[in-house]
Amino acid sequence: MSLSHYNAGLTYNSGIRYADGALVFVERIIMARIRLPFTGLALDPMIAALQHIVASMDGKPAFASLQAQVTALQAKLTALVAKKVAQKTAEDDAKQFLIEREQLADEAVALATMLGSGVENVAQGNGAVMVDAGYAVRTAPVPGGPLLAPANLRATMSELTGVINLRWRSVERAASYVAERATDPNGPWTQIGLPVRVTFAATGLVSGTKYYFRVAGIGPDGPGPWSDIAEKMAP
């Protein structure tokens, strides 16, 4: 059989068998089938696979009868990619809103704590005056003594551009904390927050700039000593 009999891309299964006592050459074409491995793929690999199909078929004469379907698939992929980008933007915005909400809550609590110190000075130990100001009265005194410096301050990059996350160990008797940053370890230092938790997100940073951070606890008698400095380049 001549080579021109065969078509590229087809698989041939040939052999010899007996028919009525005579040897007969038989040949069967094994037809290729398309594999559709899209189910179960993550979104990004699925998009890449579909874009590869569009790029491979677009404009080729062999697939001219399918061009409308190729164009429809391309339009659907364009919409899908746009929606994916919009989702990522919305997720980043949500993360930023959450950071700002927590910072506002921390600052409100810190201001209320400092205001409570002022109420105590006005009340001079009179619980009724404190209650009249809207504050609850402690039934047991808080032990005195100076605050310790926050230990184990860590700065890590956030997923968001221009954001660095801070974390440290809690300080006994600290009602809140004050966080500062600088672009030089010797200062000058800028206050960036009054968190009541032992975490804080420093926002509004310039990407690619190295920043230095320190925190201090705030107790009944005011701020305590500063922590060791942590440094990190803003993402």
Image (spheres, helix red, strand yellow):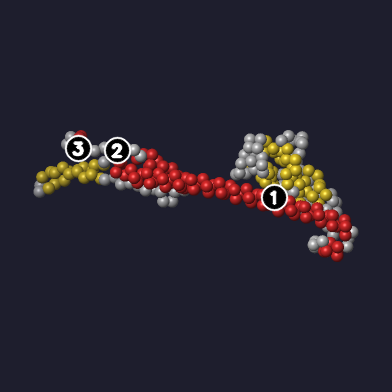
Q: Position of residue 70 (x, y in %)?
A: 36, 44
Q: Distance between the residues labelled 3 and 1?
A: 76 Å
Q: Are marks 1 and 2 in contact (CB under 8 Å)?
A: no
Q: Residue at x 10, y 48 (%)?
A: 20
Classed neighbour count for the residue bearing mark 2: other residues with Cα under 10 Å, few (<14), some (14–19), many (≥20): few
Classed neighbour count for the residue bearing mark 3: other residues with Cα under 10 Å, few (<14), some (14–19), many (≥20): few
In this rendering, which labeled residue sits more in front, label 3 or label 1? 1
Return the mark for residue 5: 3
Classed neighbour count for the residue bearing mark 1: other residues with Cα under 10 Å, few (<14), some (14–19), many (≥20): many
- Determine which residue is flagged by label 2: 61
Of mark 3 and mark 1, the one earlier in the sequence is: 3
Closer-to-camera residue (168/136): 136
Instruction: Say what secondary structure mark 2 lies in.
Output: helix
Of mark 1 and mark 2, the one earlier in the sequence is: 2
* Quadrant showing the N terminus: top left
Say which amino acid is labelled 3.
His
Can residue 156 be seen here? no
Closer-to-camera residue (63/183): 63
Say which amino acid is labelled 2.
Pro
Q: Which residue lies furthest to the bottom in this view?
A: 128
Q: Residue at x 73, y 38 (%)?
A: 182
Q: Residue at x 44, y 48 (%)?
A: 41
Q: Which residue is drawn at 63% across and 50% down?
A: 97
Q: How far apart are marks 3 and 2 (CA)?
A: 23 Å
- Determine which residue is flagged by label 1: 103
